[in-house]
Every structure is written in structure tokens, then in C-alpha cells.
Image (spheres, rainbow, N blue to C red):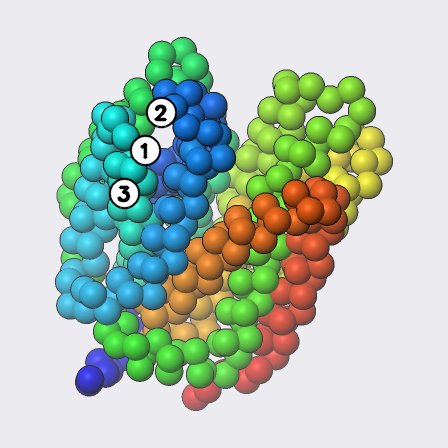
Amino acid sequence: MTMTAPVPVAPVARMRYGGLVVLMLMSFLLVTAEFLPNGVLTEMAAGLGITPGQAGQTVTVTALAGLLMAPTVGLIFPRMDRRTLLVIAAVAAAVSSLAVAVAPHFVTILVARFLLGTAISTFWSMSITVAASLSAPDRIGRAVMFTSAGLSLATVAGVPLGVLLSEALDWRLAFLVVGLASALVGVAVRLSLPPVPAAAASSIRLLVDTLRRPGATLGLVGHVFIVLGHFLAYTYVRLALERLPEVDAATVVLLLTLFGAGGLIGNIVIGIVVDRAFGILSVVGPLAIATSIVVVLSLPGFAAVAAAVFAWGFLFASWLIIVNTWVGHRMPDRLEAGGSLVVTGFQLAIVAAAGIGGLLVDGVGVVVTDAVGAALLVVGAVLFGVSLRVPRSR
């Protein structure tokens, strides 16, 4: 198998904000679709005649599909224009949500959600390459901010709106709206983005060679530990928050809204400074998240817990900006390969958190589970910090 020579993406002289906004809208809809079952779990289970635990597997199968697709999308489509690939991903996401809206059987829904997972991984694997084609050379972090902002916006508004729609009308209607909107964004991607030639990610050898670059494997392992630590704690954050004295459902909703609002603000703030400070942020951010989790566990009072939840959202929602900026600065000629590896690590961590977290919560409780998550965040921060001290290859 031959290996395509690494070719860096040709940047533009100034930011193309129209295209970046379209990327933000696409990430918003993909993340909304991904986590919508979390918000309509009870209604979905009742409508399909299954248990809530079974309905929750609609999220797990999406992450599993993403794990399989992330390292292979560049290999399956080595020469396809990346704009076209994003259009296909938008169409696949639309078909998935529309299928869920009308599917009579749970198995059909699982297949549709698997399709969504492939679309999500395709988008995130290509997002650095496409964002770089829309940004100035020294602004790649700010360009990536737009895709990550879509993720945060989905947390703040997308999933809650889907929940409100499902409660007012029907959970299937929520998926129908997301599916139709995804199709429209696919059209916008085709009209607003320039052609983006395939970058160098056309062989397993190239991905392995990218991992062999100084500091790359260490940084990616740190990335996996950071994401795993976060999701071990965040997946069961409601259980942790319900330990607050006299807490009710409205209080939990308020705290989760603070988490999402923190993420949205963090994207903007960190996106502005990330190109100059990604090294510091990549270490301080995970350590601060671990500290926030410890504060939530210790329950010092509502105000302190609320501040910790806000800080947690502020910092983790920006992690993709930080790690993708790391890729952009450390391996500018391997954006697509680096992006694929980052997404693979992210999805691997989500799948692992779903399996390990469930066992820990049932076996030892939410406090120990969250403590393990905080410890993994510290380990990830240390590994990432050490990777930054490794001199780059010339």
C-alpha cells in the first residue's frame, strides 16, 4: 500500500465566517441528535415498549459507530472532496433522525442510530481540515471554536428544546424536526463551503506514522484519560447533584443549565486565546475540572456547587478546541490524520465510560465513580503536559 505524501491544508488570508457558522450549525444538530435520547428516555421507552436501560443503548450504539468510523473514514474515502463528505454526513444524519421518527421497531432505531454515529465521526474527523481551509494560518484554534461552540449550544439549547417539544407533542416529532433541519444544513454546507481537497490520511501506515511523532502518542493517551474522566463523572452527574440537601428536579435542571451556559461562554473565551495559550490550557483545564468534581462531591453548599458546575462546563466544552489546536500546531501537515485520532480517542473514552461507569455506580456508588473520574483527569493532564515538553520533529 502506498502512502500519500503529507500535504498541509492551504489556509486563507482571512477568516471565512459564513462557512464557519455553517459548520457550527452542523455540529449543533449532530450533537443534539446524538444526545436527544437522554432527554426523552422515558417517553421513548414507553412508546417502544422497552426499558429505559434499553432505550439508553441508542446513545451507546452511536458512540460505538463513531469509534469504528473515526480512524477509517479517511481510508474509505481517500480522495473525496471533504466538502462533499460533509454533505454526505449531513444527509446520513438526516436519514437517521427521520428513520427514528417513523421506525416501529427498536432494532430499526438502533440501525438508524448507528448511521448517525458514522455521520458524527465523519464530521469531527474532517472538522480540523475544513476549518483550517476557512481560517488564517495563525487562527486555526479560533476557527475550531465554531465547531465546538455548536456542541456547547446543543447542550444549552438543542437537547432541552427537543425535550420540551417531546413533552408538548411527541418524542418522535423532536427527531423529525432535527432530521429536517439536518437536511437543510447539508444544502448550506454545499453552497457555503469551498472545495476542500483530501489531506494525507489515506493509509493505516500514515496514521501509525502520525502516532510515532514525538509526543503524539503520549498526548493522545492523555486526551483519552481526560475525556474518560469527564464522562465517568458527567454521565452520572444527576445522581451526584441529587445528594444536595432538599434538591428537587427544578434545581437539577438549573444546575445542568449552568453547565451548558458555562460551556458556551468557555468556547468563546478560550477560543479567543487558545492559539497563544493551548499549552497552558491543556494542563490547567483538566486539573480545574477535577477540582470542580471534587467540589461537587464534597457538597460545601449550593452556591459553591453551582460555581463548580459552571466551571466544569466552561472548561470541558472547550477541550475539543484545545486538543484540536494542539494538532494544528504540532502537526500542521497531518491535520486529517491527527483529527481522526483525536475523534477515535474521544469515542473510545465515551464507550469505556458507558461500560465502566455503569459497573462502578452499581457496585460502589456515585461518589467513588466521580472520584475515579477526577483521578483520571489528573493523570491525563500530567500525560498531556509531559507530551508538550517533547521537542517536535523537524
The type of residue carrying mark 3 is Val
- Residue 311 makes an appearance in the image: no
* Mark found first going from the N terminus, 1 or 3: 1
Closer to viewer: mark 1 or mark 3: 1
Q: Position of residue 271 (x, y in %)?
A: 50, 51
Q: Which residue: 53% across, 62% down?
A: 224
Q: Residue furthest top?
A: 168
Is residue 18 toward the left or the right of residue 263 in the image? left
Inspect the image, locate mark 1, and give the three-letter code of the amino acid beneath it.
Phe
Q: Looking at the rendered structure, which numbered label has been put on residue 195?
A: none
Q: Quadrant of residue 108?
A: top left
Q: Label 2: state its secondary structure.
A: helix
Question: How many angstroms separate mark 3 from mark 2 (CA)?
Answer: 15 Å
Instruction: Answer few, some or many: residues within 10 Å of disc 2's Cα (few below 14, many 20 plus, some between 14 and 19).
Output: few
Q: Which mark is residue 106?
A: 1
Q: Nearer the viewer, mark 3 or mark 2?
A: 2
Q: Decide: marks 1, 2 in contact (CB < 8 A)?
A: yes
- Residue wearing tag 3: 111
Residue placed under numbered mark 2 in the picture: 48
Residue visible at 70% across and 55% down in the picture: 372
Q: Does the image show residue 263? A: yes
Residue 358 at x, y percent in the picture: 59, 46
